[in-house]
């Protein structure tokens, strides 16, 4: 498998994981809080918005 194929598979896997995590977060205040502590701004966002946020690096430094 080429590096390009591996990169594409990784990208698709990351997108699927972001969508799964976003759907899970919408049902869990604790998960929303965990993502917020990790630096992802996800509070008060829709599933689609959270998915897009989780596809990117955190926008804030992690909080302890």
Image (cartoon, grey):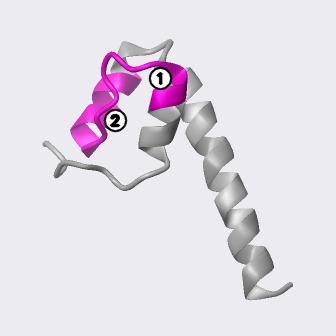
* Residue 37, x across and y down, in percent: 23, 37
For residue 52: magenta?
no
Q: Residues within 10 Å of mark 2 (few under 14, many from 20)?
A: many
* Residue 32, x across and y down, in percent: 36, 24
Mark 1, residue position: 25
Identity of the residue furthest to the right in this view = 1
* Residue 48, x across and y down, in percent: 54, 27
Q: Is residue 2 left or right of residue 48?
A: right
Magenta segment, which residues?
31-49
**Please, is residue 22 above or below residue 11 in the view?**
above
**Picture residue at 42% right of the left edge, 40% below the top:** 53
**Callout 2: SS:** helix
* Residue 13, x across and y down, in percent: 69, 54
**Picture residue at 61% right of the left edge, 35% below the top:** 19
**Callout 1: SS:** helix
**Picture residue at 48% right of the left edge, 16% below the top:** 26
């Amino acid at each position: 498998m080429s590096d390009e194929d591996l990169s594409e598979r990784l990208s698709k896997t990351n997108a699927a994981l972001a969508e799964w995590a976003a759907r899970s977060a919408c049902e869990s205040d604790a998960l929303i809080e965990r993502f917020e502590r990790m630096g992802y701004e996800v509070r008060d966002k829709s599933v689609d918005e959270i998915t897009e946020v989780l596809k990117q690096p955190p926008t804030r430094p992690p909080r302890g």
